[in-house]
Amino acid sequence: MKENVTIRPMEKGDYNAVAALWASIKGMGIRSIDDSEEYVCRFIERNPLTSVVAVDGDRIVGSVLCGHDGRQACFYHVCVAEDHRLCGIGRAMVDRCVEGLKAEHINRIYLIAFKHNTGGNSFWRQLGWECRNDRNYYELYLNDENQTTFIV
Ligand SMILES: CC(C)(COP(=O)(O)OP(=O)(O)OC[C@H]1O[C@@H](n2cnc3c(N)ncnc32)[C@H](O)[C@@H]1OP(=O)(O)O)[C@@H](O)C(=O)NCCC(=O)NCCS
């Protein structure tokens, strides 16, 4: 990883910079409510140590929202700025989240990667994660106002 890049826990005050990073990531789906400042801060309050940002100087160049429910963990919005990719930042952020989850005695992490996201799926395979094809993913929307916008 670039030596001037550091990984640290994400704080509520990082929201604007992280949201700006998300808005620059092609293919990222941003939810109007779940990804609002209020909801992201609520997520960080519930999981204060497990989400991370990668910082280069005073710029946030990567982030992972990571939390658990006491049983298993989920990663959301794993991303690295385009001009900082392929130098180990994604792997370093994932490693840091994994360490944090192990410290909280969590035994399993899951995440969703769209099938068409070739780069994202290559990344997870390269990191040794298992792609499950033997399961169906179910969801139930509870709030029609929580709309997703994809970054193009
Ligand atoms: C996926 C993403 C987070 C990877 O971040 P990164 O910092 O470039 O990844 P790293 O440099 O840590 O790469 C780790 C390994 O994955 C491999 N890898 C990363 N991106 C890859 C790609 N697009 N294609 C093939 N391999 C890739 C690297 O070669 C590296 O392998 P190595 O350790 O054997 O050298 C970044 O490309 C990104 O933000 N993509 C857009 C958002 C996204 O798709 N997120 C995942 C959603 S599920």
Image (cartoon, rainbow, N blue to C red):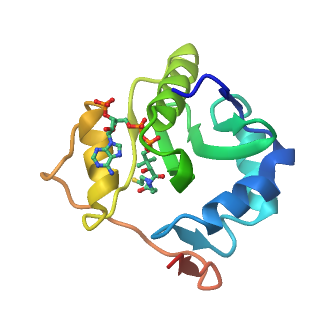
Which quadrant does ligand 1 occupy? Answer: top left
Residue furthest bottom in the image: 144
Whether residue 21 sits left or right of residue 105 in the image: it is right
In this rendering, the answer to whether 152 lies above or below 130 is below
User: In this figure, what is the number of numbered marks?
Assistant: 0
Q: Is residue 126 visible?
A: yes
Quadrant in the picture for residue 56: top right
Quadrant in the picture for residue 59: top right
Q: Position of residue 96 (x, y in %)?
A: 55, 24
Residue nearest the viewer, comparing 112 with 84? 84
Which residue is depicted at the point 72% across and 63% down?
20
Q: Is residue 129 visible?
A: no
Which residue is depicted at the point 60% across and 66% down?
24
Q: Position of residue 106 (x, y in %)?
A: 48, 24
Whether residue 129 sits left or right of residue 62 in the image: it is left
Q: Position of residue 72 (x, y in %)?
A: 45, 34
Residue furthest left in the image: 134
Which residue is depicted at the point 31% across and 41% down?
124
Whether residue 56 sits left or right of residue 84 in the image: it is right
In this rendering, the answer to whether 33 lies above or below 6 is below
Residue nearest the viewer, comparing 38 with 152? 152
Which residue is depicted at the point 22% across and 61% down?
136
